[in-house]
Amino acid sequence: MNMGDMNSGNMNNNNNNNMSGRTSNGTQVNIMRFDITKNIEDTTTIYTALPAHAEINSRLDANSADNKGNERPFVINGKSFDPNRVDEFVASNSTEIWNITNNSPMAHPFHAHAIQWQVLTRNGVPATGTDLGWKDTFLVKANESVKIIGKFEPVNQGDYMYHCHILEHEDAGMMGYFRVGETGHLDEF
């Protein structure tokens, strides 16, 4: 949907390929209406090149396909959530690139607390459309890899969650902790 110079617009769902596998039988459903009341200058800055200090520091693999029959089939990096385990260590004021890979047959919305991300690529193809801009949640489709970049500034030192934003998947263990510290090295914690 491109609002352009419109004063209002509707967002409709006529997608017959939703996550539940059920279809809308071609029926259009009104989801939301936008009424533009004021034009505001866009001051957004988008990287033209990655910062020199950005590194690929983490790889998160969401997987439910290989765990059928498991009491807790929804995992990240082959592990179900453990509140006593920190999964990732991040330095304050750093810029990191993470690869999120979904090896399951369904889409998973990835969400991280305390940080905004920009999608860089999907399966190696540069981000376009709704992937542009900062977000804290984005969809990782079935059998897809999404490369994201995030600036951990200003993020207070401490523990934060990342997880699938489908409540039943999160509750079934598809989440983890990341810890933000001064250097991001394990020995400082």
Image (cartoon, rainbow, N blue to C red):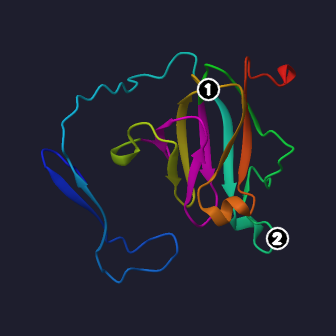
Give the amino acid type for the residue marked by disc 2 in the picture. Glu
User: Residue 40, relative to residue 81: is it above or below?
Assistant: above
Q: CA distance from mark 1 to mark 2?
A: 35 Å
Secondary structure under tag 1 reads loop
99 with respect to 64 (left or right)? left
Q: Nearer the viewer, residue 151 or 56?
A: 151
User: Residue 95 occupies which quadrant of the picture?
Assistant: top right
Position in image of residue 58 (x %, y %): 68, 35
Q: What residue did someone put label 1 on? A: 155
The residue that mark 2 highlights is 71
Q: Is residue 76 magenta?
A: no
Residue at point 84% right, 19% down?
Answer: 188
User: Is residue 67 positioned above or below 118 on the image?
Assistant: below
Mark 2: give few (<14), some (14-19) or many (20+) Cα within 10 Å. few
The structure residue drawn at horizontal position 82% and vertical position 70%, both measured from the top left corner, is 71
Q: Could you say whether the residue bearing mark 2 is in a helix, strand or loop?
A: loop
61 or 42: nearer the viewer: 42
Magenta segment, prevailing SS (helix, strand or loop)? strand
Look at discs 1 and 2 and give the one toward the viewer.
Answer: 1
Q: Amino acid at mark 1?
A: Val
Q: Residues within 10 Å of mark 1 (few under 14, many from 20)?
A: some
Does the magenta segment cover residue 99?
A: yes
Residue at left offset 80%, top offset 39%: 86
Over which residues does the magenta segment extend? 97-126
Question: Picture coordinates of residue 23 (x, y %)?
Answer: 42, 80
